[in-house]
Amino acid sequence: MHNEYLLGIDIGTSGCKIAAFTPDGEVAYQCTEKYETLYPAKDCVEQNPLDWWEAVCRGTQRMFAHTAIQPHEIKGIGVDGQSWSMIPVDVHGHVLRNSMIWMDRRAVEQCEQMKRVVGEERIFAVSGNPLSPSYTTGKILWMKEHEPELYARTHKVLQCNSFIVFKLTGIVSHDLSQGYGIHAFDMRTGAWDLELCDELGIDPGLLPELYGCSDIVGMVSNEASASSGLLIGTPVVAGGLDAACGTLGVGAIHDGETQEQGGQAGGMSIVMSQPIMNNKLILGYHVVSGKWLLQGGTVGGGSLNWFQRELFGKGVTAASKASNPSDNREDSREADQESDSLIQPVFDPFREINEEAAQIDEGSDGIIFLPYMAGERSPIWDIDAKGVFLGLSYATTRGHMARAIMEGCAYSLQHNLLTAIGGGVPVDELYSMGGAANSQLWSQIKADITGKTLRIASSDTATTQGAAMLAGVGTGIYKDFDEAVRRTVRFQRAYDPNPAHTALYEQGYEQYLSAYISLKEWFTQMKVRS
């Protein structure tokens, strides 16, 4: 029997996921390889790109060592990754410094300088994106100002997925879905605006050639084959943004279809046929050709992990400790490596929390949680915002707080959805992915708060599946994206909103918005005092 597989590689915030799929979307292998996140100074968050590459090689070597999959059976490779990396490489392709990742916010002054010199209106008219230190643009300018010798040696600036594509093929690229990270990317034409590059103070020569996400960039090189075990000559496509690949992986490819992501970086991605700009949201190309995504990006998805770690402690169940690949605990890599199964079972890492939260009525007895544990991205764009519980009393239990966290994250999702709808972008059903989609309670809460049906596909493999689907389209295994979705995406369950609960949550949502408005000035004052 002749076997064919498509390989998806996901460079996430906490680790690299590797998954091999049959053309019909069946998972033949998956694993997660962890790597370190560095915090060298306040607001500075970095990772070593070479750690990503080593994780890729460990994962592919494990796949070939522990399965019957043969290198020649891998017919194409797609790579996705976290947003807003900044990887400077020299003319030989050597990495010059650690990558500032999406959580890095050191470039505040560079953003203020761009506002003063170029103007927010000019930048937004081209890029369709607000200025924030999280984006790649400010990070390039930070390096130019603070590390001029490295800037002078920089040949190209890469994103995390394009760096892995480079390591696999030796070809420098930048896919369209990651273009939005640099504000000189013209959102309408899908090309670099060289004039705006000059105005921003960025050397246009640093920006790589742009590729469609399913375009074949190159083939696995001799050197990459020796490190990874992959076959020389295996096609590698450009790949794309993790959220965009996840959107494809859950089957959202038509207008109004919306991916909802519940992980360390949460949010939503609405599919559109034209680039509708909204200065409170994030606009980018979909990995599907001819489509755009209006996105909301939040940071609250990790709140429940934090709560479990700090307040549940040793009460965490064995299943929780095994966890799924979205968890951040150090022991998850050890659990991965000790597992004898080729396909790791999916565990619910929130079982105890779910059980306690499920005992609490809708609205958490009046407790409101603001999930701004690392500032907040869209739609408030407030790096000073903090996580807050409001309404605690001696009657408050862990279950109250856990449910309030789930509801607070769902309110932040609703805030983004209503911001998009208010800007003229329709939202249909929500297709959910990420670790939070394993929680039936949390999924129902999101359906109730948003008033939208929530559908769950393969939540734990959606991102790598999307990357693999890109490889399938690029190599001709699928004739188009419709066929790719038709053959691979299967929904496991759905959650319809309860109208009575939706009406109750409307009041909670107003309280959520009011709480942030009331505390906004206090957040700023806290920063000054800290």
Image (cartoon, helix red, strand yellow):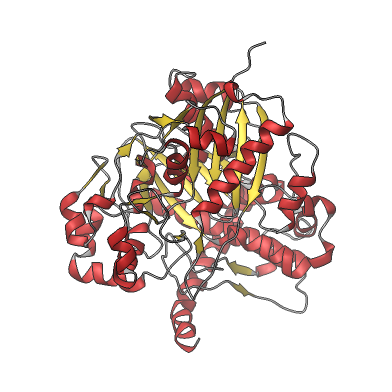
Q: Is residue 509 left or right of residue 194?
A: right
Which x, y percent locates residue 358? 76, 55
| Residue drawn at 49 percent across, 69 percent down | 375
Q: Residue furthest top?
A: 1
Whether residue 121 can be seen here: yes
Between 287 and 169, the one lying in front of the other is: 169
Q: Residue furthest left?
A: 195
| Residue drawn at 43 percent across, 37 percent down | 256
| Residue drawn at 71 percent across, 46 percent down | 440
Between 25 and 373, the one lying in front of the other is: 25
Q: Quadrant of the N terminus?
A: top right
| Residue drawn at 70 percent across, 59 percent down | 329
Which x, y percent locates residue 18? 61, 39
Image-quadrant location for residue 121: bottom left
Between 2 and 253, the one lying in front of the other is: 2
Q: Is residue 153 left or right of residue 214?
A: left
Which x, y percent locates residue 231? 54, 27
Between 8 and 90, the one lying in front of the other is: 90
Q: Is residue 474 left or right of residue 263?
A: left
Identify whether 170 is placed above or below 128: above
Image-quadrant location for residue 274: top left
Q: Is residue 289 left or right of residue 60?
A: left
Which x, y percent locates residue 381? 41, 65
